[in-house]
Image (spheres, coloured by chain):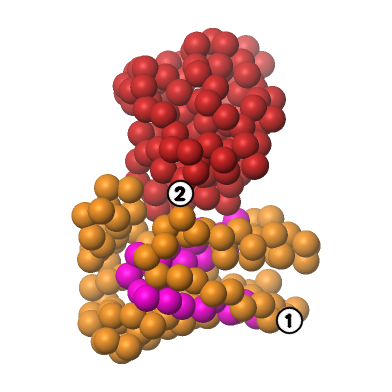
Amino acid sequence: MKVCDLVEKLNLTVFCGEQGINNEVEGAYTSDLLSDVMGNVDEGQVWITLQTHRNIMAIASLKEVAAIILVKGYKPEQAAIDQSNEEGIPILGTDMETFEASGVLFTLLNEEKGKYGAF
Amino acid sequence: MEFVYEVEGGDFTKAGNASSAVKKTLKQLNVSPKIVKRIVVALYEAEVNIVAHAYKGTISVNINQDQIHIVLDDVGPGIPDIDLAMQEGYSTASSKVREMGFGAGMGLPNIKKNVDDLKVSSEVDKGTKVEMKTYL
């Protein structure tokens, strides 16, 4: 599954970093504690959070995540937008709360795995 | 080979820049991706510690055939009780820093998990030195 498929299926807003819209999605991680994300998110995963400042992009870039999803209608700060565009890591948005967004994404990614029998 | 980077205390807009530069260099030197990933986690945490707690610091990265040796040396308040600081969940970060999602008390434990050798030494009101070694 690609980032653009998530955008379509979950009706997400694409704030920035559109060059990365075809990034492959390997899974997801949900957390608002930056050290927790730093220590646990894997390359190619989507990161679900409510943090909107530029440091989320520093982490996204260092860990090479596929995209960031901001929950509850939050919008990224300008500095985060700028870095997202530079790095080609999309920042996406949804009005869903964290629990719901994680649940929907979990279901979607699990269906995908089932379809191709990858796991 | 040695590379040195400067880190400014308090400036969160630049937090991660040095880690990002080191990551690029390690990749160019063909260090295995698995090792690069671990070093990046440890180094970012240590860099953010300087930004969050110290006034300024330097990061020197020394690479030879057998190991990557990184030393972070800061001028700052120092750590009165290093054993306490190493405990997961212990943090002295300000509420402003915590609101940003930093300061969960996971930094030093994260560093320890991701390097082969960690040495933290500190002098109160002078600064802190973090040395991390990764064997290749």
Q: Position of residue B3 (x, y in %)?
A: 66, 77
Residue placed under numbered mark 1 in the picture: B1
Chain painted orange = B
The magenta segment is B37-62
**Residue under the point 37% across and 27% down:** A74
Number of numbered discs present? Answer: 2
Q: Is the magenta stretch mostly helix, strand or loop?
A: helix
Which chain does the numbered disc 2 sit on? A
Q: Where is residue B99 in the image (x, y as percent from the top left)?
A: 27, 47
* CA–CA distance in space, label 1 to label 2: 29 Å
Circle 1 — which element? loop
Residue B133 in the image: above or below residue A24:
below
Note whether residue B84 is visible.
yes
Q: Is residue B40 magenta?
A: yes
Picture quarter containing residue A19?
Answer: top right
Note whether residue B46 is visible.
no
Which label was assigned to residue B108? none
Left or right? Give the position of A25 relative to B31.
left
**Residue under the point 28% across and 80% down:** B77
Left or right? Give the position of A48 relative to B85.
right
Q: Residues within 10 Å of mark 1 (few under 14, many from 20)?
A: few
Q: Does the magenta stretch include residue A76?
A: no
Q: Residues within 10 Å of mark 2 (few under 14, many from 20)?
A: many
Q: What residue type is labelled 1?
A: Met
Q: Where is residue A75 in the image (x, y as percent from the top left)?
A: 41, 29
Q: Which amino acid does label 2 sit on?
A: Asn
Chain painted red = A
Which label was assigned to residue A55? 2
